[in-house]
Image: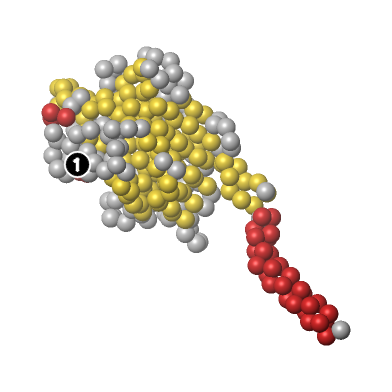
Amino acid sequence: MQNAVRNAITSCLFWSVLLWLIAPCLLFSQVQKSNFAKKPAWKDEFNKAGKPDEKKWSYDLGCNWYNDEVQCYTDRPTNVWIEKGHLTIEARNEKMEHREFTSARLVTKGKGDFTYGRFEARAKLPKGVGTWPAIWMLFSDAPYGSKGWPDNGEIDIMEHVGFDVEHVHGTIHCAAFNHVQGTQKGTKKAVPGLEEAYHTFRCDWTPNNIKIFVDDQEYFSFDKPDNATWKEWPFDHPHHLILNVAVGGGWGGQKGIDKAAFPAEMEVDYVRYYPYVSKKS
């Protein structure tokens, strides 16, 4: 009888401890989980040779840009084209107006404006001191503050500067956190071969968090602060995608510009957007 009682007590303790261990997992499985659609709702695979698809892309044009950049942005086929399944943006050492370089800056504004989701691009970056390629997002409307930057948000999925060959950067900017004040939130990751091979750059953006990845490795995460206002979290309204190669500037030109490195190309294999969904598992 004593053995039976002892066995019953032992069994009861075992199941109690097991339930205590797995209860949080059972509870977690019932709460809502952030997720993303399995198929992209917007994408460009760059399979049609020639100019970028005008239904998906427009151009920012001109010779006067922020950050002391020294390029003119054009829509010429010598600066931007599609060939053999890749989009190429080429920065060139050539005179235009009062500048010595030309390049291109593609935008999806008005043709692809997104609130939350997974954004993914596979690209090979340009080589050369003075290059400053980026895959990033900027506000499409401007409900907050100054009605401009940084109040309405910027998400940098990928930035790279040619003098820092092996590092890629992921950053966010807003009124409270931006590079002008030196308060921007971001970090960098060492990735060998950024200029030699294709790598996948990704952003997962949800109502409460922004994560940045390279080759599926997360290296930056920014949570919506408690009691956040638009100054700390303007990331609740549409943003559009931008692909560009800048030349020089306050960051890209810190170590000068090696004119012998041009023409310098960023090649993009694809860009894909997967909508954010929230569902019970």
Residue shown at the point (27%, 21%) measured from the top left: 79
Residue 225, horizontal then vertical, whole percent: 47, 59
Inspect this view and state whether residue 103 appears: no
Observer-nearest residue: 26 or 203? 26
The disc labelled 1 sits on which kind of residue?
Phe
Q: Residues within 10 Å of mark 1 (few under 14, many from 20)?
A: many
Task: Tally the marks.
Answer: 1
Q: Is residue 252 above or below residue 208?
A: above
Which residue is nearer to you in this view: 279 or 172?
A: 279
What residue is drawn where x is 53% and y is 49%?
207
Q: Which percent across, then down, holds residue 4?
A: 83, 80
Task: Name the residue nearer the viewer: 265 or 151.
Answer: 265
| Image quadrant where residue 85 sits | top left
Q: Is residue 161 visible?
A: yes
Query: Which quadrant: the N terminus?
Result: bottom right
Mark 1 lies on residue:
163
Image coords of residue 102 (percent x, y): 22, 25
Q: Secondary structure at mark 1?
A: loop
Position of 87 with respect to 235 (left or right) is: left
**Residue at x-position 28% and y-position 45%:** 167
Check the image and report above or below for 93 versus 66. above
- For the point 41% across and 37% down, the residue is 200
Q: Residue furthest bottom?
A: 2
Q: Nearer the viewer, residue 184 or 261?
A: 261
**Could you tell me residue 111's position as x and y percent?**
47, 27
Q: Residue furthest right?
A: 1
Q: Is residue 62 above or below residue 252?
A: above
How has the structure been colored for display?
secondary structure
